[in-house]
Image (tube, rainbow, N blue to C red):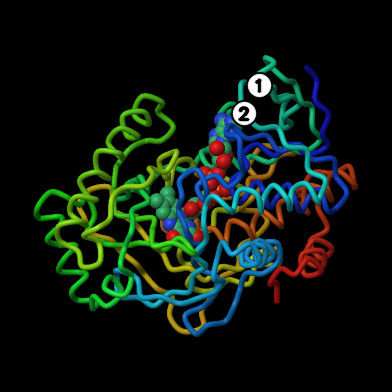
Amino acid sequence: MELRAEVLVLGGGMAGTVAAIAAAREGAAVLLAERWGFLGGAATAAAVGQFVGWETEAGRRVVGGIAEEIVQRLVVLGASDGHTRFRMSTGHVMDRVQYDPELLKPVLDMLAAEAGVTLLFHAALAGVTRAGGAITQVELLTKAGIAHVAPRVVVDASGDLDLLARAGADFLPLEAGEAMQPATAMFRFGPVDFGQFHAIPAEGLKTLAARGVAEGALARAALHASRVEGTDDAWFNIGRIALDATDPLALSAAEVEGRRQSLAAAGFLQHAVPGCARGRIIAFAPQLGIRESRRVRGLHVLTEAELRAATPFDDRIAWGAYPMDVHPAKGAGLTFDGFGDDHAYAIPLRSLIPAGLDNVLVAGRGISATHRAHAATRVMPTVMAIGQAVGIAAAMAVRGNAAPAQCDIAALQDALRAGGAYLP
Ligand SMILES: Cc1cc2nc3c(=O)[nH]c(=O)nc-3n(C[C@H](O)[C@H](O)[C@H](O)COP(=O)(O)OP(=O)(O)OC[C@H]3O[C@@H](n4cnc5c(N)ncnc54)[C@H](O)[C@@H]3O)c2cc1C
């Protein structure tokens, strides 16, 4: 089977979906290939349940564009109460948008359809053909067998960067003392008496979480939950599993361990946590939530120092404000380094372009960033902002018959602003 596309996006997570929509709005013929039967990636398949990191601590909004359009659609559907603030289990006050992962699926379907994106669901990467610095063909395993696509520009938005791995791209190593962030299996639990649950003071939550860890019921010292709008249920994010998510057998064992941890945690909620006595597990997220796996080596490697300095890159295409949130692979703790006040940081286009590959862009959590910088840029508002830039850059590369690295930065920035993105 031959499929035609100017831009192929592999992976329909929040980054890939927004990239596909942005590229199609710019007039490119876009094929979005996704292994599940719905879009959203971690947002839906791993049921993360909240978008965090829209604003600086002082409350300045630094992400807009298609990400904000998605929020507005969710609100209209009754699937979100929009932008709010909450106190995290670490004690930090953070902005967030809670949403119902089920209703996010049709919201993304609609936006993709309106933009003219061709969706190819139930399609997994099967092979990549590379000639020098160009990917010339991608093979996808579909219900009808192998489908061949020969796009002008390829976007790897698969989270784990499977396409780039097949293409022999270079990835960034962990440095001494660093460990890959662990995964979490999310579970939906209810009914919760939120009056009682939210009345637990911050110190009380910490004590309860520490008790859960001491009893062996919680893998992580947190009782973090995002409420499903219009229900008495919440998605709980309180598990922790260290693994290399690109190892198929380790990934399989981790899915089993995730359900075991969820059952143990639900038992603890029922007997120990105010407001949870009548609850039970309603659903396990369809897949494990992966925080970190491959990070590409790009034309620029974004660092913690650059985030802290808010380096004003000439080729900046997005801003982020989320802190460096590192979940340790071992132990139950968390390090959460806020940037303070009104601090935000820019992300350069060069960090989205893999070194040595001319017709490829990366969207999402695998951009070229150090382990510490990735811990900040991985959240969904930021990956959506990156996705919008990637989509427009891909369409511009097709139009100009040029490599994304050669794209007219000022024109890209103008197009982003015209699309509602935050880009001062
Ligand atoms: C447990 C957990 C909690 C988190 N909490 C928050 C939070 O509260 N707020 C927040 O904003 N962010 C949070 N994050 C971070 C955020 O959810 C992710 O970093 C972000 O969603 C990544 O988006 P992405 O599009 O880059 O990748 P993904 O969401 O991983 O999307 C990749 C897509 O590619 C598809 N795919 C992968 N491989 C293939 C293949 N070989 N062939 C075809 N398709 C493929 C996948 O099915 C998926 O749809 C959390 C992450 C985790 C794991």
* Image coords of residue 106 (percent x, y): 65, 49
Read off the residue under disc 2.
122
* Image coords of residue 311 (percent x, y): 58, 71
253 w.r.t. 155: above or below? above
Amino acid carrying mark 1 in the image: Thr
**Residue at 85% in and 45% down:** 28
Disc 2 secondary structure class: loop
Amino acid carrying mark 2 in the image: His
Q: Specify whether 299 is left or right of 55.
A: right
Q: Specify whether 299 is left or right of 338.
A: right
**Residue at 27% in and 45% down:** 262
Do the numbered discs 1 and 2 sit on residues whose CB atoms are within 8 Å?
yes
Q: Residue 197's image quarter?
A: bottom left
**Residue at 62% in and 28% down:** 122
Badge 2 density bin: few <14, some 14–19, many ≥20, Cα 10 Å: some
Badge 1 density bin: few <14, some 14–19, many ≥20, Cα 10 Å: some
In the picture, the quarter occupied by the C terminus is bottom right
**Mark 1 or mark 2, earlier in chain:** 2
The mark found on residue 82 in the picture is none
* Image coords of residue 192 (percent x, y): 31, 63
**Residue at 23% in and 78% down:** 201
In the picture, the quarter occupied by the N terminus is top right
C-alpha separation, residue under disc 1 versus residue under disc 2: 6 Å
Disc 1 secondary structure class: strand
Q: Residue furthest left?
A: 215
Specify whether residue 116 is in view: yes
Read off the residue under disc 1.
142
